[in-house]
Amino acid sequence: MLEYPIQAHENGIKIKPELMTVDKLYHCIYDNAVFIFYKDQEEIMHCYQVENLSAATEIMNDPDNLEQILHKYAVEK
């Protein structure tokens, strides 16, 4: 099993960008918040906090469907 590149610890979030695939979304739940990470084609790291409480709750309950959940809430706007 491959190591997940984003890990939440009691002192914060540890990121291992070398384990990340370009343009793939990764998530992390830390301090009751959902964070989304990805590395772009230039290998620049991006991080966003999901502020929509409904979306964050859905992601916490079903992280395997991260992209579908984000798409659902992006389309609703």
Image (cartoon, rainbow, N blue to C red):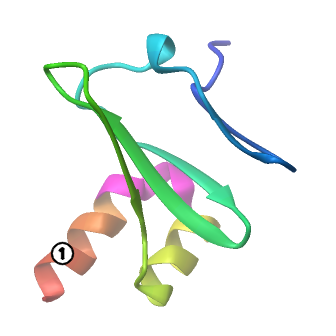
Please tell me whether the stretch drawn in magenta is mainly helix, strand or loop.
helix
Quarter of the figure with residue 42:
top left
Camera-nearest residue between 68 and 36: 36
Q: Is residue 7 left or right of residue 39?
A: right
Q: Residue furthest right?
A: 10
Q: Is residue 16 above or below residue 75?
A: above
User: Given the image, on which type of amino acid does mark 1 rest?
Assistant: Ala
Q: Quadrant of the C terminus?
A: bottom left
Is 63 inside the magenta-drawn segment? yes
Q: Is residue 13 left or right of residue 24?
A: right
x and y, in percent, of residue 31 in the image: 73, 67
As drawn, 35 above or below 69: above
Q: Position of residue 57 (x, y in %)?
A: 57, 79
46 shown above or below 71: above
The span picked out in magenta is 62-67
Residue name at image x 65 percent, y 58 percent:
29
70 or 18: nearer the viewer: 18
Instruction: Please tell me which residue is depicted at 87% across the width and 50% down the height of the picture.
Output: 10
The residue singled out by tag 1 in the image is 74
Judge whether 70 appears above or below 67 on screen. below
- The residue that appears at 46% across and 20% down in the rendered structure is 17
Q: Is residue 40 magenta?
A: no
Looking at the picture, how far across and down is residue 38, in whole percent?
33, 37
Q: Secondary structure at mark 1?
A: helix
- In the figure, is residue 3 to the left or right of 57? right
